[in-house]
Image (cartoon, grey):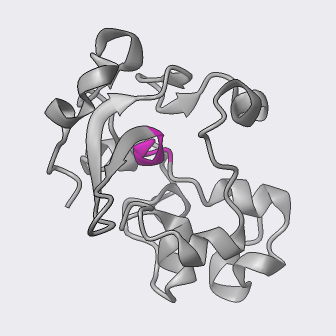
Amino acid sequence: MLEPEFWKKKSLEEMNQEEWEALCDGCARCCLYKLQDEETGEVFYTNVVCRLLDVERCRCTAYSERSSLMPTCLVLNPRQARELKWMPQTCAYRLLAEGKPLEWWHPLVSGDPNTVHLAGISVRYRVIEEKDADMEDLESYVVDWLG
């Protein structure tokens, strides 16, 4: 059982595994392929998702094995949440690392796991599965709907 509003009382480092996992809002934006400009460092998101993502549920189909099955998949920790500027601006880990509150649609705030989808934050119905994309031409899949 999670303590009410634990994210307001604990730092990222103080959270236990259950609390840490509960911070994920289920948007799956982190599962999008990203491109980085080598000169400027700017990150561009595509609408192509990892092959492990269940695009309806916006959940990984192999969560516990994800980093071995998909070597580019990051197992996020508090230090990375503070340092990785490519994390989506709406990401709870990033928001809390920056001292910002969770959004109204976050399931921990709303009490409903569907608000992330209803608010248009999740990738549901907006993405192409890896198997259906030309992975040699990811530039043509760059999107600007992440805000």
Q: In the picture, which quadrant includes the C terminus?
A: bottom left
What span is in magenta? 26-31
Looking at the rendered structure, the number of numbered marks drawn on it comes to 0
The answer to whether one can see residue 5 in this image is: no
Q: Residue at x 14, y 51 (%)?
A: 144
- Foreground residue, 140 or 57? 140
Tell me if residue 90 is in the magenta stretch: no
Where 16 sits versus 98, above or below?
A: above
Q: Nearer the viewer, residue 55 or 141?
A: 141
> In screen coordinates, is 143 left or right of 78?
left
Residue depicted at 64% across the width and 29% down the height = 70
Q: Which residue is at a point 46% across and 73% down the rendered structure image? A: 102
x, y percentage for residue 41? 33, 66
Whether residue 97 is situated above or below residue 87 in the rendered picture: below
Q: Quadrant of residue 24?
A: bottom right
Residue 139, position as x, y percentages in the image: 20, 36
Name above or below for residue 87 compared with residue 65. Answer: below
Q: What percent of the width, then of the height, locates residue 126?
A: 23, 31
Residue at 50%, 44% in the rendered image: 26
* Residue 69 in view here: yes
Name the image quarter holding residue 132: top left
